[in-house]
Image (cartoon, rainbow, N blue to C red):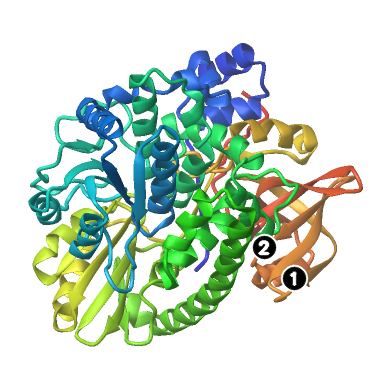
Amino acid sequence: MPYRWTFYPDASRDVVRRLMDGLKISPVLARVLGNRGVASIAEGQRFLSPALADLHDPFALPGMDRAVARIDRAIEARERIGVYGDYDVDGVTGAALLSRFFCDVGADAIFRVPNRMREGYGLTDAGIDEFARAGVRLLVAVDCGTNSVREIAYARGLGIETIVADHHTPSESLPDAVAIVNPQVPGSTYPFKFLAGVAIAFKLALAVSRARGLSDERALEDLDLVAVGSIADVAPLVGENRTLVKRGLRVLTESRKVGFRELIRVAGFEGKEIGVWEVAFGLAPRLNAAGRIGDARAAVELLTTNSVETARLRAEGLERENSRRRELDADILSEALAMVSDPEVLADRKAIVLASDTWHPGVIGIAASRMKERYARPTVLIALDGELGRGSARSVPGFSLYEALARCADTLVSFGGHEQAAGFTIERRMIEPFRDRFLAHAAERLAGKDLSPTLRIDGAVPVTHLGIELYEEVKLLRPFGPENPEPIFIAKGLEPAGRPQIVGRGRTHLKFAVRDGERRIEAIAFDKADLHATVADGEPIDVAFTLGENNYLGDRQLQLRVKDIHAAGAGDPAGAAPSLESF
């Protein structure tokens, strides 16, 4: 589907001037900061240079005092602590973080993550039974547990007390746990509500450290785990998350963990600076592959081992699982796309709900994300096996999946998740009622909204302002992610220079150059070979792009990373794009 270009409203001249003068930055960067809601010099300083001192007190989280007191008692009494994580990257990194930390501060701790295929999401009776047999007396649930009312009661009946360190939206009833450390629970006054599960685990470790009179440095060593889990869980990269991830990526690039070093090696990133892209498209998928089609325990073992040999074996095993996952993902996506190839399937529908007996339940979430991006609609994919199905859902801004699934709760066996990502179990016979109810809710909530895929553009920049200097300045806005997207600019009326080339292993990328007068700039459009004709006819074009670079033997040249191309004037017919070089 073609992109619709939308533009941020023109930032206040006073705000732009204030940021330019106070932060000593260009009008382009000042306008981009204004587009991100930054209005004061102090806000700009915190955004560009987030500091650990800006983090909120971990004891401000609900339940933290009780959680720390109970953990401290367990450490002193040498009670066995069982860390129970989820099988996704957030849960795996959270389980690894607390397992490492508890062992380092002298606790007797073991970990467990559920098998997606045999057990499904969250706390299970089988997992609790396993902990009971191992002598666990205190269970710490990471990235799960907020809605495990029955399971936590079951654990209590076996003599196991539970602490929940989670970030999921609570249902109406909360479990009878020692403490529920979750900024989302009713009555919480914690200033930042959007921490990932691994960040809650980090806050718990930090609070235990301070209560025991230890330095923060031990907890800060695990910010690499926090960065990876937060990025993988698509946490908004603003507020505390921005501070944690920015510092965590620095720790990750020079990580002391042999597991991360081996994972970086098999992903092909040795010697490179690790950023959000490397995590999201390199490290996280490999960690996720274990939980999706294998056993997530291998991923936790990778991140907790101190043995180079064990780390190498686990990393190479994850590499093989990830290759298999990619093949399954491609097959599922191809079949799902074929199901909606008939225009009538999407006509007047604000959401996509599909099911198949051939899909792997561990991979449908990835395909659902790709479908959502392509069609700009909430997407639900269901993998059927006998009389049951497992569903994964991904959403668009403004549509809460948790609310939607709650509206359909009587058609589901179970469900859980966030606004933008969720999962559920369903009986085969209930798929049609569920589909009808879900589509009706989407039609109501998204009525009147244009669901065309959109590019939100920061503004127009003349070619004369494009250079390595601007690229370096824009890098100050990293890490990019939800709520802090990488700035997209447009340049208007450019002339294609030379012949465009279709490149890449699968011949899916478009490489070309553009000219504005005497200035020539190289450009590449990844996975957009279909735009070849728009460039090849030689007519002036408007280009939407982010900034990148080519670095050949130390010769750094700016490169436009093209997101979309229109014939000149077609993408911005009313001249709505603000010009970023003036104020």
Q: In the image, 221: left or right of 86?
A: right
Residue drawn at x 67%, y 16% as measured from the top left: 24
Q: In the image, 97: left or right of 249?
A: left
Work out whether 117 lies above or below 236: below
For the question of whether residue 581 can be seen, the reply is yes
Amino acid type shown at disc 1: Gly
Front residue of 493/456: it is: 456
Horizontal and vertical percent position of residue 442:
23, 62
Front residue of 497/417: it is: 417
Horizontal and vertical percent position of residue 110:
35, 50
Q: Which residue is mark 2?
A: 526
Q: Are marks 2 and 1 in contact (CB under 8 Å)?
A: yes
Mark 1 residue element = loop
- Local packing at callout 2 (Cα closer than 10 Å; few below 14, some 14-19, many 20+) is some
Front residue of 116/528: it is: 116
Horizontal and vertical percent position of residue 194:
34, 38
Front residue of 487/245: it is: 245
Q: How many marks?
A: 2
Amino acid type shown at disc 2: Phe
Quarter holding the C terminus is top right
Q: Indicate the quadrant where residue 342 lies.
A: bottom left
The span from disc 2 to disc 1 (Cα, nearest Å) is 9 Å
For the question of whether residue 10 can be seen, the reply is no
Q: Which mark is residue 539?
A: none
Mark 2 residue element = loop
Residue drawn at x 34%, y 67% as measured from the top left: 115
Q: Nearer the viewer, mark 2 or mark 1?
A: 1
Work out whether 37 lies above or below 298: above
Extreme residue toward the top, this view: 22
Q: Which residue is mark 1?
A: 504
